[in-house]
Amino acid sequence: VQPNNYSTFYDDQRQNWSIMFESEKAAVDFSKQVCIAKCNSSPGLDSVLCQDLVLGEGQGVEGGDSLEVAYTGWLFQNNGLGQVFDSNVNKDKLLRLKLGSGKVIKGWEEGMMGMKKGGRRYLIIPPAWAYGAQGVAGRVPPDSTLVFEVEVRRVKLVKECAGSDGLSVSSRDSPAPSPVPNSDGFSAE
């Protein structure tokens, strides 16, 4: 994913290609399908598949950074998106998490590394990196592969600075830009 509705990729001959889409939505939809295709062409998914949808701005997040995230989670069923099992997109509260704290599934900890404020990413998470054999009663069946679309709305980066006590910590907190509705009227179809 590149700015201005571009996607770039390498083919199997290591030749670089770029595609320009008519809208951000078309570029995002294409990127989601690429991620699903990667998953379906893998003989056995044993790590998190990540696909950036929107790059975002600023510094990439690392362990210890605090985030506020909007997300939707689907079950991966029949080689594609199944039913939504969780979302906070239409709710007032964003999910707050600190990367590396172990409070979210391992697939999120891994898949969100490097994301930037305002960035959106697609994550396909195998059972071992999600809820495993136990699942979540009434919501996630045992051994389920999960798909998440996550958007970082706020970031609080924590960096160690050399202070007189050697322990000083500075942070930067800034809200993400508001999403702009797609109004160009074009379609990728």
Image (spheres, helix red, strand yellow):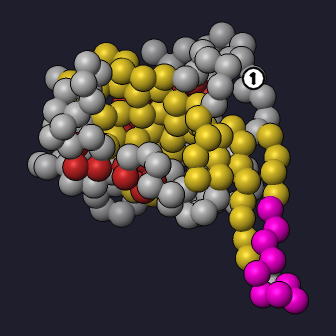
| Residue depicted at x 73% and y 76% | 160
**Magenta-drawn stretch contains 168:** yes
Question: Which of these two is toward me, 185 or 74?
Answer: 74
Residue 162, relative to residue 123: is it above or below? below
Identify the magenta region: 163-171
Q: Which residue is mark 1?
A: 180
Residue 103 is situated, as x and y percent measured from the top left of the image, at 46, 49
Residue 145, relative to residue 86: is it above or below? below
Residue 78, relative to residue 3: is it above or below? above
Residue type highlighted by circle 1:
Val
For the image, the number of numbered tags is 1
Crowd class of label 1 (few under 14; some 14 to 19; many from 20; radius 10 Å): few
**In this picture, residue 180 sits left or right of residue 2:** right
| Residue depicted at x 15% and y 40% | 133
Residue 3 visible to the viewer: no
Residue 139 visible to the viewer: yes
Circle 1: element type? loop
Question: Which of these two is toward me, 40 or 88?
Answer: 88
**In this picture, residue 129 sits left or right of residue 157:** left
Residue 67 is situated, as x and y percent measured from the top left of the image, at 64, 47
Residue 59 is situated, as x and y percent measured from the top left of the image, at 70, 60
